[in-house]
Image (spheres, helix red, strand yellow):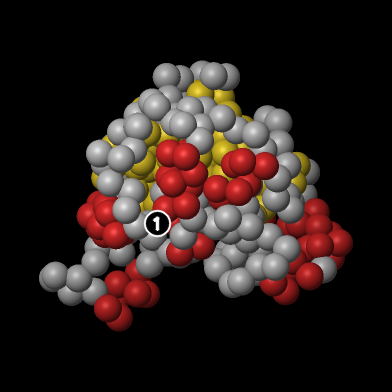
Amino acid sequence: MGVGDGWPCADRAHAAFLYRFGAATVLVDSGEPISGLIDNAEIAANEIDSILITHLHMDHVGGLFMLLQGLWLEGRTKPLPVHMPAEGIEPVRAMLRAGYLFDELLKFDIQFVPIRAGEPIQAGRSVRVTPFATTHLSGLKRRFGGRRGPAFEAFSFLIESGRKRVVHSGDVGTVGDLEPLLDKPVDVLVCELAHVGLEELGEFLKGRKVKQVVLVHLPESMWRDLPKTRRCAEKALGKTGFVIPTGGEAIAF
């Protein structure tokens, strides 16, 4: 749905990825303007089974409030689990109340669930998601952390359904954050490039069994010259198939 990085993007929506596994539908991240994108794609209000938030940077969570308002106005009735870093749950609840989206007003129950590294999440009947901590926010934690400060949590996800295995990087600190997610073969690696270089990624993937790579979260310099970026990806990834989506595409795997 959205593949942009953290900068303002006139031609890209911010991070939002809709995964469909049979009858199960899972939304990973909710960068703006996800509410409009969901509506344009004619996705029914009750269709999304779970929302998972990788971390609390605004390009990954900034569209959540309007999405929830939109689901209410569109008549959602079934409960909606929202899995997110624990430190964000109460502030998000407070913001919903400040925006007059009271629990008593909504026709569906929003179930905020804290994400814990290594603790599997059942996201829809047939989808199991295992979160892995990343070092994406380590710099902020060193600068602003403290005993009473934020936890600065960020996660990658291993998404499994039947025999399908998908790794969703979220934002990482280094490519090494992905190592525990790729210890077994995977069908798809959705990998951000704002904090990982293509050559670095190619070297890291050598000898690992990854059928397809979806490259997202490109910095502006790479986005401006997609033909060059594709050539660099072909060189770095070798025989591994890859896709660079521009937003709104359906990718089969």
The residue positioned 45% from the left and 20% from the top of the image is 126
Question: Left of 44 or right of it: where is 92?
Answer: left
Q: Look at the image and tell me whether residue 172 can be seen.
A: no
Residue 167 percent coordinates (x, y)? 52, 41
The residue positioned 77% from the left and 49% from the top of the image is 238
- Can you tell which quarter of the image residue 20 is in? top right
The amino acid pointed to by label 1 is: His
- Can you tell which quarter of the image residue 120 is in? top left
The quadrant of the rendering that contains the C terminus is: top right
Question: Left of 224 or right of it: where is 184?
Answer: left
Question: Left of 77 or right of it: where is 104?
Answer: left
Classed neighbour count for the residue bearing mark 1: other residues with Cα under 10 Å, few (<14), some (14–19), many (≥20): many
The residue positioned 60% from the left and 49% from the top of the image is 36
Query: Closest to the observer: 36 or 15?
Result: 36
Q: Look at the image and tell me whether residue 91 can be seen.
A: yes
Q: Residue furthest bottom?
A: 143
Q: Considering only vertical position in the picture, is 164 above or below 130? A: above
The number of numbered badges drawn on the structure is: 1
Residue 173 percent coordinates (x, y)? 45, 64
The residue positioned 34% from the left and 42% from the top of the image is 83
Q: Considering only vertical position in the picture, is 123 above or below 225? A: above
Residue 114 percent coordinates (x, y)? 26, 45
Q: Considering only vertical position in the picture, is 230 above or below 36? A: below
Residue that badge 1 annotates? 55
Secondary structure state at the residue bearing disc 1: loop
Residue 129 percent coordinates (x, y)? 41, 34
